[in-house]
Image (cartoon, helix red, strand yellow):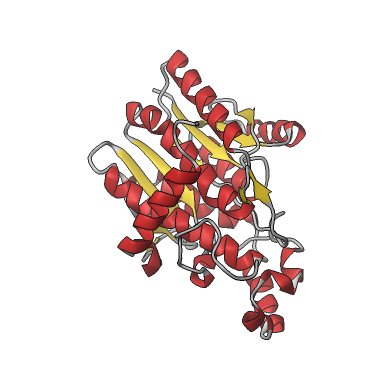
Amino acid sequence: MMKTAVVTAGTGGIGLETALGLAVAGFAVTVVGRDAERGAGAVERINAAGPAHPARFLSADLGSLEQVRALARTIAADHAASGEPLTVLVNNVGAMFAERQTRDGVEASFVVNHLSPYLLTELLLPTLTAGAPSRIVNVTSGAVAVAKRGFDAVEPPGGYYGFHWYGRAKLANLAYTLDLAGRLEGTGVSVFAADPGGAATGMTDGTMNDPKIVSPTLRLLWPLVRRTFERSTSGPASAAARSSITAATDETLTGRTGIVIGAQARPVAPHRAAADPRVVDAVRRLSARHAPLAPS
């Protein structure tokens, strides 16, 4: 039976390299993105590698929860009609904003980095379960280490600092990932987090030139922080994609779940805060409140 994979934000950077790796591994790959022209280019590049199955593109703005719902309906309907399983879902989407923005009235970083992949995953769980054994791969980040850990509200009190808000949203998603792995134990759906480390991508290029994205305390160390960040994001996206590809395909992970695959494409310990029951419970409630599975 055909193996299929969906890769969000798969038209460039780490997402495209992930899609390429999965296509070469024998998957029929669907890449999701906002821009049809970039989508066509991604499909052309994937198909030029001579995969066993041609790639396709689906258009969706993953910063819009309504478009995420529509995307989930399309994917589920396509798999129901074809009878092919959904083997792998890679939630690769991510974004960091220098200035505070909103999507659907909610702080944008939390929407894009957590609520969007959370909602897409939850809506596709019936399809993934029907296609088991299957895998969910959520892309995380080392930025969780600088995240505020309060999740009583979408936004913590205090000023907006894009790097910390990005890390907080990724922490929420990592806590959700580990929680989901426990929920799906025994269903045949394995859940992994993949940390790509760093790479030069559209999200990082130029973003870290603005010291306002970090808190005033960290800003005092800005020259050191920026140099460290630039070194860590100087590698190619193809190397950063290895963790996601490993999580999606490595046969030694069969039957395992709730594992973080680090930048060296090997299991690593998850950040401690992501397994804190208080964080997990708060993220669970916050997600259900702002991205309900049945829209009102």
Instruction: Please state the horizontal and vertical placement of residue 214, each as a whole percent of the image.
Output: 65, 73
Residue extending furthest bottom? 220
Observer-nearest residue: 227 or 97?
97
Instruction: Please state the horizontal and vertical placement of residue 62, each as a whole percent of the image.
Output: 61, 40
Image point (39%, 50%), residue name: 285
Observer-nearest residue: 293 or 231?
293
Image point (56%, 68%), residue name: 157
Quadrant housing residue 219: bottom right
Observer-nearest residue: 92 or 283?
283
Task: Examine the rendered structure and indicate whether residue 178 appears above or below residue 40.
Answer: below
Give left or right: position of 180 versus 39: left
Image point (43%, 44%), residue name: 288
Taking the image as drawn, is residue 90 in sight? yes
Quadrant housing the N terminus: top left
* Tally of marks: 0
Residue extending furthest top? 81
Instruction: Please state the horizontal and vertical placement of residue 112, each as a whole percent of the image.
Output: 59, 48
Give left or right: position of 163 versus 154: right
Taking the image as drawn, is residue 89 in sight? no
Image point (33%, 26%), residue name: 130
Instruction: Please state the horizontal and vertical placement of residue 152, each as a whole percent of the image.
Output: 45, 60
